[in-house]
Amino acid sequence: MQVPRAILGSERTTSVAAATTSPAPPTPSVPPATPTVVPVTPSPSAPAPTPYPTLGPDESTQFAQGMLKSNGGCDLPCLWGIEPGKPITTSSLEMVAEQRFHVTGDGFTRFNLQSTIAGNGETEQYNYLISVDIALQDGLVSSIEMDGDRRIGEATKVFQRDWQSFSLQRILTKYGKPSRVMLAAYDATTERNTPFLFSLEVVYEQKGVAIRYDGALLGTPGAARVCPSLAYVHHIGLLLAQPDQPEQYKTLLDAWNGAPTTEALQQSLGMTVEGYYDNYLPSLQQAAGMTIDRFYATLRRSPTACLRQVKSVP
């Protein structure tokens, strides 16, 4: 059975190669021009805002790298100063637009911030895509998704450095033991140059936080090691929503993972939501025979720890 695209990571992952180009020679650093920003105050009666300008990559690279390191001074599920459950502010969008991100959306239900982090040099060749998707409901931020994708087998050094704050060890150390951990190992020969991959997802339902790590298996499914350090991870995805609403968050999480959340989908696939997870994104206990307590203690202690004897999904 072919593995659903949902557990292969973000749909943006497969488009990274197409979305990126060969790095251009470095250009002298010059102060960025201040873009004209159209103030945005989402409301049912307001007209759709004009998209922000798309500018050059240098400042967006610096801005994204700084935000990945500091997260704008706030903790998840807040991202870059944008907080689920609260209105999105014009200043938040201006901050991003001024740093040469491409900002689009209708202003009522969605904004998307996207940039390719690219450059070159003898020791720092890198090219990866970062995307932040903000969903709105009644003028409030209902959820935030962030994805970082690099080409498999490339750009590990800078990707590791830029995403260090979102490494599994850092997340476990900062946010504690997750409420749920899911793990899948699978053969993706027909979909990737690297044939055997894993998806590891840690969930904090009460906090409104889930983080998924997709990477290359060491070995083959059934006799494999999952090493979720950033050296082996090519995609990191986050789903963020308002905390202290676990039931609502579970609904968002099921949809994010591609589970059949409607009766029509369940009939079409011939399985329930629970059956979907059992088949395609099983629990840590099912996949590796490991408890969350042991996982937490082991992976928090060592950034290079690996999980062994991971079962493959169909």
Image (cartoon, rainbow, N blue to C red):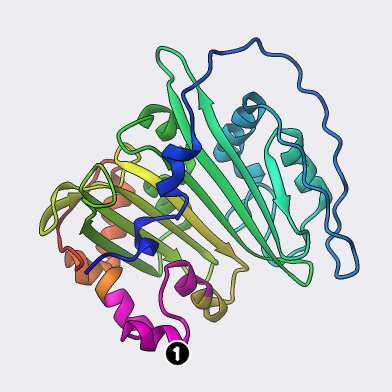
Q: In the drawing, does residue 162 fall left or right of residue 151?
A: right
Q: Outermost residue toward the left? A: 223
Find the magenta span and give its range: 252-278
Q: Outermost residue toward the right? A: 45
Residue to which mark 1 is pinned:
263
Residue 101 drawn at (x, y percent): 67, 38
What's the magenta bit mostly, secondary-structure-wise? helix
In what element is the residue under mark 1?
Answer: helix
Residue 239 magenta:
no
Residue in front for this viewpoint, 309 or 55: 55
The answer to whether residue 282 shows anywhere in this view is no
Quarter holding the C terminus is: bottom left
Residue 39 drawn at (x, y percent): 88, 48
Residue 110 drawn at (x, y percent): 69, 60
Residue in front for this viewpoint, 137 or 180: 137
Q: Which amino acid, by three-letter code, is at mark 1?
A: Glu
Residue 220 drawn at (x, y percent): 12, 51
What is the crowding at mark 1: few (fewer than 14 residues within 10 Å), some, or many (at least 20)?
Answer: few
Quarter holding the N terminus is: bottom left
Q: In the drawing, does residue 241 fall left or right of residue 272?
A: right
The answer to whether residue 113 shows anywhere in this view is yes
Q: Residue at x 37, y 84 (%)?
A: 268
Q: Residue at x 51, y 78 (%)?
A: 251
Instruction: State which quadrant residue 188 falls in.
Output: bottom left
Instruction: State which quadrant residue 150 falls in.
Output: top left
- Seen in the picture, residue 182 relative to 74 is either above or below; the reply is below
